[in-house]
Image (cartoon, rainbow, N blue to C red):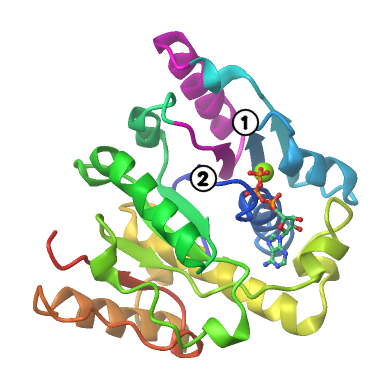
Amino acid sequence: MLLSKKLKILVTNQKGGVGKSSLSANLAAYFAIEKDQQTVLVDFDRQATSSQWVVHAKPHPKLRAESVSQVIHGGNRLSLFTARSTIRDAASKADVLITDITWSPVIGPDILDVFDLVLVPTSLSELELLSTIGLLRDLRMGLTKSGAPKLVLCPNKVHPFQRKFNAMAAQRFPVPFLLAPPITQSKEFEVHYQKDFIIRAGEPEVQTRFRQFCQAIEQAAAFVPNTLSANAKPAGTPATEAMRVLHERTQNAPANSPVVQPAFEQIPSIIRAKPANF
Ligand SMILES: Nc1ncnc2c1ncn2[C@@H]1O[C@H](COP(=O)(O)OP(=O)(O)OP(=O)(O)O)[C@@H](O)[C@H]1O
Ligand SMILES: [Mg+2]
């Protein structure tokens, strides 16, 4: 993939333990190691989990991390201003920027403007989904105004028995979203925690699945104007072709039809879903 513009990704959820830091660190590693993109991870968490992951894993010349905890949680104009300039400064020195933030209402949706993609990891437990739906309600303004970043829901810690579970029906969610291929529950995330990256050290099957997730995020960038060069657009690989077909199908779906929600194993890459009443 050739990025014609910097790609700025926010990984967030207000809920703890959904995999924000694991996804941030491992996605950053994918862009740096496999896509040869200068990548920076900006970690706003007090525990600095994802930046520590990058620091402790074997270094890679294209990957670095910054920990800027405290800045964003002030909840005033100054902290918002400082957070934005931190993100812009970091992005100016990289091709891909990934930001890990535990969401809190004091941050406010204005910060979203800085990003191209907002990734929200969530498990498929009903409790966590309801919490994610609540978060999206709070972020709705920031995710729907013109020029807003694209929302990508990222099912994580998915159990095999949940793969056919239609928990991600678009009608449940208050904003349109792209759906990433699910990341299954795997001990590999614990085994390599802050030691190495899934795409470098994970078991082959877990590596493959995680790579599919990362490729889907790259494809999501195609929905952001000017982010991808033309050669990454349709008529390319079977995956991009499948995405194009699904995209057209969902675009043309009647408003009240259950928007294409295939069983998870049939999701080829990434699909776009509009809630019925949107
Ligand atoms: N797909 C997965 N399979 C199994 N375990 C996972 C998976 N993703 C994350 N985990 C584990 O879940 C725990 C929480 O993950 P992580 O720290 O990435 O979440 P977080 O959302 O950043 O949490 P916090 O809100 O505390 O910052 C970790 O122990 C991690 O190893
Ligand atoms: Mg974290």
| Rendered image quadrant of residue 169 | bottom left
Q: 257 or 270, which is in the foreground?
A: 257
Q: Left or right: where does residue 249 sit relative to residue 212?
A: left
Q: Mark 1 = which residue?
A: 44
Q: Would you say residue 237 is visible in this rendering?
A: no
Q: Earlier in the sequence, mark 1 or mark 2?
A: 2
x, y (%) of residue 74? 52, 15
Q: Is residue 128 visible?
A: yes
- Quadrant of picture, ligand 1: bottom right
Rendered position, 133 above or below 204: above
Circle 1 packing at 10 Å, graded few (<14), some (14-19), many (20+), is many
The amino acid beneath tag 1 is Phe
* Closest to the observer, 7 or 74: 74
Left or right placement of residue 254 versus residue 5 in this view: left
Magenta highlight on residue 80: yes
Residue at 58% from the left image edge and 44% from the top image edge: 98
Please tell me which residue is depicted at 51% across the width and 89% down the height of the picture.
Answer: 265
Q: Which residue is mark 2?
A: 12
Classify mark 2: helix, strand or loop: strand
Residues shaded magenta: 75-104
Label 1's element?
loop
Q: Quadrant of the C terminus?
A: bottom left
